[in-house]
Image (cartoon, grey):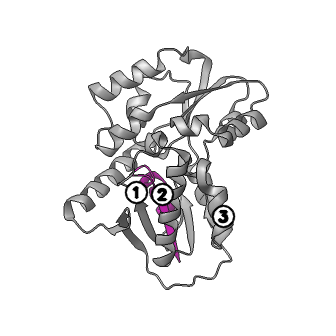
Amino acid sequence: MNIAIFDSGIGGLSVLYQAKRMLPEAHFLYYADEDHVPYGEKTREQILTYTDEAVRFLLDQGADAIVLACNTATSVAAATLRDRYPLPIIGMEPAVKLALNQDDTHRVLVAATPITIRGNKLKCLVEHYDGHHLVDLLPLPGLVRFAEKGIYSGAQVHAYLSEQLAEFNLEDYAAFVLGCTHFNLFKQELRTLLPPQMHFVDGNAGTVRQLIRRTVNLPATHGSTPGVTYFASGRPITDPAQLQFIQNVLAHLEKMYPIE
């Protein structure tokens, strides 16, 4: 089975990492829209155009199912894409429900891109599950730009996060929701700034479980062998330096995975 994983950039590699652990027999098509990253600062119309182009390309590559490994793309385009295309399209959303299920008495800080935070999807999610008004929202667009440069820690990242977190009394919080797949790359740096009782919550494992549910009885229409084929905005990634960069990101995610 060919499983396509789409993101605006490298953030979706955190979902690919999780999917490879849970679906080791699958072949993955990873599509990073590097020509248009970051999505979180684009218009809704632009994002819908970019995601539609990506889905059509991935269908041509033999995708049996597509994961929108981008909270922003899911918020803007998932419903439209499901209406247009017949294959399973699995989206992501910030794991607000999971965080509140784990602790419904302490505050929850949800970090995401600006367009996700402004979007109706997250608003409805919070209104539905946050009956005690415990959720606060924090846009962190700078982290996407750092991630795309391969910068996950250090003085610049630390200063940026310190400034953004300064307005919150973090002792009141139990969870930090990673509401953008790029943000998983920064768990180590965030851990140095968050108090011990705050733990990370993301939707990666839940998204892959939904993928499995949607595809368990789905006949694969294309033969495949385990592995990953990488694309950058529709272009096959074959340059050794680019492929090594991807492997470096996956190796970094291996280190981030156990950090809670």
Label 1 close to label 3 by CB (< 8 Å): no
Going from N to C along the chain, the mark reached first, 2 or 3, is 2
Q: How much space separates mark 2 and mark 3, taking CA atoms?
A: 15 Å
Relative to 142, residue 121 above or below: below
Residue type for callout 3: Arg
Foreground of the two, 104 or 235: 235
Q: CA distance from mark 1 to mark 3?
A: 20 Å
Return the x and y of residue 39 as percentages of the image width and height. Answer: 46, 46
Residue hosting label 2: 50
Count of residue discs:
3
Which of the two residues, 179 or 17, is positioned nearer the viewer here?
Answer: 179
Which mark lies nearer to you, 2 or 3? Answer: 2
Q: Residue at x 59, y 47 (%)?
A: 203
In percent of width and height, residue 116 lies at 57, 40
Magenta extent = 1-21
Residue type at numbered disc 2? Tyr
In terms of sequence position, does the residue under pointer 2 or pointer 1 come before the other?
1
Q: Secondary structure at mark 2?
A: helix
Residue in the image at 54% along x and 18% along y: 170
